[in-house]
Image: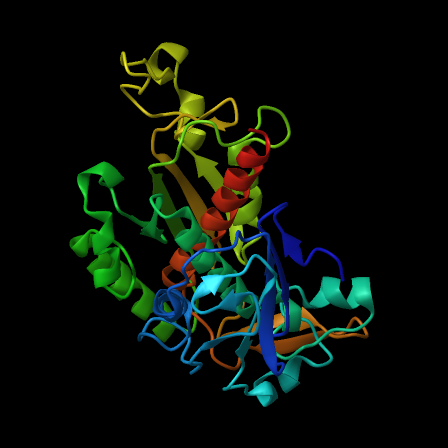
Amino acid sequence: MAGNSFGKIFKLTTFGESHGVALGGVLDGCPAGISIDFDAIQNEMNRRKPGQSAIVTQRKEPDEVKFLSGVFEGKTTGTSIGFIIENANQKSHDYSHIKDSFRPSHADYVYEKKYGVRDYRGGGRSSARETACRVVAGAVAKQFLKDIEIQAFTSSVGDIFMEKPYQDVDISNAENNIVRCPDTETADRMISKIKEIRKAGDTIGGTVTCVIKNVPIGLGEPVFDKLHAELGKAMLSINAVKGFEYGSGFCGAKMKGSEHNDLYNTDGTTKTNLSGGIQGGISNGMDIYFRVAFKPVATIMQTQDTIDKDGNIVKMEGKGRHDPCVVPRAVPIVEAMAALVLADYFLLDKTYQ
């Protein structure tokens, strides 16, 4: 299986399956001498881990990170940073019913056709549990980036949207409720919706908005390696993601140029920021902001028709422990992938100077 690595200089390679012994990663390219706050890394893992609230999967995993290499006396050495996250709460028997059949809208069928074999326990390598490794690497990247602030939050669940622009709310308040929406009134409605959906044995999707502040001018390249293109790739590589837009996004397609252009101030900043902090594929020093769309979780606790290995139509009902909505736990994953992109581009920019 190819495609287990992300990044060019600041490069992460992950390994492991949802119900294997452990997940893990190797992070290459991190400069030497970076002070590592292990508590901060674990806090990022706690934001992503299962079982943290009543509206997420109840799988109980401590998600404790063990660093194997690349850090000595609290600082990076410049060598490969190896780490593992042991799986402590596998219930592989929950997936025995799909050994010979394929869950609708999962990777089961295409894995079987592509590789001729698949780990049916929780989806194996296709499980969103792999994203735990990304959060570890992203937490290291955040500490490397220092003054750059990366804050994501839940901006919609189903048809419930946070109507206020991010500039009009304190987005740090997102961590004060279990759905991670910074607007309290909207958060309460989102939580009620997720509980209602869960009770019905169904799932629901939503969006995560991410805001990145204090990005220097000049990150990104103007042709194939545009900064927003790599951010898009990073976000679309996250499980369950169905869409990515930055700046004005699809709304910008409805506007005239006279409405959409960001006019300059004398210091080079712009009066508006419909460009989303990126122009010509290069950061312009304004806030970078984008939105990521997540589909409803494919496993539902309702009976559906599917097919088995012999092509027969069979009945299937979801079992095991699954999120009724992935969005609250996806917030730190979005931040982590954004941090990996920025760390990589920061180092790429340094090599050209």
- Nearest the viewer among 17 and 37 is 37
Q: Is residue 254 above or below residue 331?
A: above
Question: Residue 139: horizontal and vertical position, in percent?
Answer: 43, 59
Q: Is residue 220 above or below residue 318?
A: above
Q: Is residue 110 left or right of residue 147?
A: right
Q: Is residue 274 above or below residue 345?
A: above
Q: Is residue 315 left or right of residue 208?
A: right
- Nearest the viewer among 93 and 62 is 62
Quarter holding the N terminus?
A: bottom right
| Residue in the image at 44% along x and 35% along y | 246
| Residue in the image at 60% along x and 60% along y | 79
Tell me if residue 18 can be seen. no
- Nearest the viewer among 32 and 87 is 32
| Residue in the image at 83% along x and 70% along y | 116
Tell me if residue 197 can be seen. yes
Q: Is residue 300 left or right of residue 324?
A: right
Quarter holding the C terminus?
A: top right
